[in-house]
């Protein structure tokens, strides 16, 4: 279906284990996308994930981190765009060996997520410290003693094309 044909409708997409119910409206140059859904990706990810990464210009280092976080099973919510086009995004569920919660305000909206300012917070909690350490790309040696929970908290604020303030905390 071409975007020009979509007018104030809700579409459900089921592609490569991704199920999203999105409200699509607008016109080709100014689409309106919002909704809720479930995102489940296997360890391979697949061509859909590659196309998504390509479309938003995802750096290779982020792609690698996300690939180590598969499989994932998330609930997603994307707010209606505000008057300036910004949108809130929330994700919760599991990613790799961790429980994940992400809350983000995307000033550029979902289609311009890396083009405008971002204010995001991420919590990852795992019951396998060594597994979460590997998932984060920190190697095979546990950063914290094994046998307990490990929690990573990160926040990011700023413009991806300029300056980002990042805060990361790790506890176990």
Image: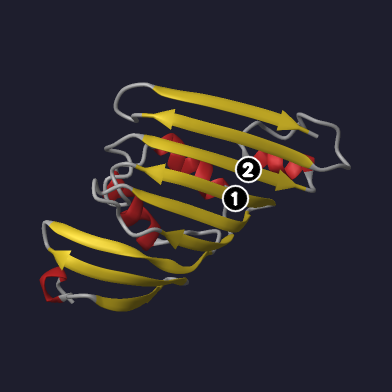
Circle 1 residues within 10 Å: few <14, some 14–19, many ≥20? some
Location of residue 52 in the rendering, given as x and y in whole percent from the top left corner: 33, 55
Quarter holding the C terminus?
Answer: top right
Q: Residue furthest right?
A: 147
Residue under label 1, please give it: 101
The coloring applied to the image is secondary structure
Q: Up-down: is 115 above or below 102? A: above
Location of residue 10 in the rendering, given as x and y in whole percent from the top left corner: 31, 77
What residue do we see at 24% from left, 50% from top? 83
Count of picture labels: 2
Q: Is residue 141 left or right of residue 146?
A: left
Asked if the residue at tag 1 contacts the one at tag 2, i.e. Cβ–Cβ closer than 8 Å, the answer is yes
What residue do we see at 33% from left, 59% from top? 80
User: Depth check: 21 or 72 in front?
Assistant: 21
| Quarter location, residue 121 | top right
Q: Is residue 130 left or right of residue 93?
A: right
Residue under label 2, please give it: 123
Q: Up-down: is 121 above or below 4? A: above
């Amino acid at each position: 279906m071409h975007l020009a044909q979509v007018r104030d409708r809700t579409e459900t997409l089921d592609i490569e284990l991704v199920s999203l119910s999105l409200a699509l409206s607008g016109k080709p140059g100014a689409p309106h996308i919002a909704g809720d859904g479930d995102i489940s990706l296997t360890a391979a990810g697949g061509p859909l994930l590659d196309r998504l990464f390509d479309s938003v210009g995802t750096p290779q280092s982020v792609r690698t981190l996300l690939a180590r976080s598969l499989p994932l099973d998330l609930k997603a919510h994307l707010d209606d765009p505000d008057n300036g086009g910004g949108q809130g995004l929330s994700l919760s569920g599991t990613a790799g060996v961790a429980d994940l919660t992400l809350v983000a305000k995307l000033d550029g909206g979902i289609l311009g997520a890396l083009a405008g300012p971002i204010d995001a917070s991420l919590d990852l909690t795992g019951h396998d410290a060594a597994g979460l350490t590997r998932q984060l790309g920190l190697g095979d040696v546990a950063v914290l003693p094994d046998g307990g929970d490990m929690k990573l908290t990160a926040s990011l604020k700023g413009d991806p094309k300029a300056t980002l303030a990042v805060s990361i905390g790790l506890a176990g």
